[in-house]
Amino acid sequence: MAPDDAGVGAEDPEAQAVLLALSPAAVFLVVTVNDRPGAAQQVLDVVADINALVRAVGFRQASAGLSCIVGFGSAYWDRIRPADAPRPAGLHAFRPISGAVHDARRRQATCCSTSGPSGPISPSS
């Protein structure tokens, strides 16, 4: 995918599968992107075709339903969005959540990715 003048993929993005059934397992990858020249473009290059990466990894056991969702923190979104793109209406800094058993605390992450199969994956696959 060739980037346009704003550095974002020129083709229409493929929607992420955010409405799939909950899975029995999930992996969260939370990263901070540094300010080195080219770092933001490297992140955009990876996430621009994240669905192809999921297909490449998940094809071995397609019935498991591997999925991946990518999100950006509000401050990072402001750094990477094209100048003419509006800020999403509901985008805000993460608000910590406290539960009876688990807490979700605010971190200095800029990018979060979650993935998981919809069923067990056999180690022999």
Image (cartoon, rainbow, N blue to C red):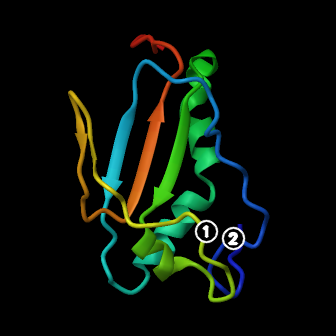
- The residue at which mark 1 appears reads as 89
Q: Foreground residue, 22 or 117?
A: 22
Residue 87 drawn at (x, y percent): 60, 75
Identify residue type, mark 2.
Answer: Gly
Residue 55 in the image: state x and y as whole percent: 63, 36
State the separation of the CA atoms marked 2 and 1: 22 Å
**Residue drawn 44% across the image and 11% down it:** 122
Return the residue at label 2.
9
Above or below for 75 versus 120:
below
Q: Residue at x 42, y 65 (%)?
A: 73
Is 34 displayed left or right of 5 in the figure?
Answer: left
**Residue that sits furthest to the right in the current view:** 12
Pick whichever, 39 or 115, lies toward us: 115
Along the line of sight, the residue nearer the viewer: 95 or 48: 95
Name which residue lies at 26% across and 34% down: 99
Q: In which quarter of the image is the N terminus?
A: bottom right
Mark 2 vs mark 1: which is more N-terminal? 2
Instruction: Give SS at disc 2.
Output: loop
For the residue marked with disc 1, what is the amino acid?
Ala
Can you give x and y, in whole percent of width and height, for residue 70 in the image? 51, 52
Q: Are marks 2 and 1 in contact (CB under 8 Å)?
A: no
Quadrant of residue 45 within the rendered picture: bottom right
Compared across the picture, whether 118 is left or right of 20 comes to left
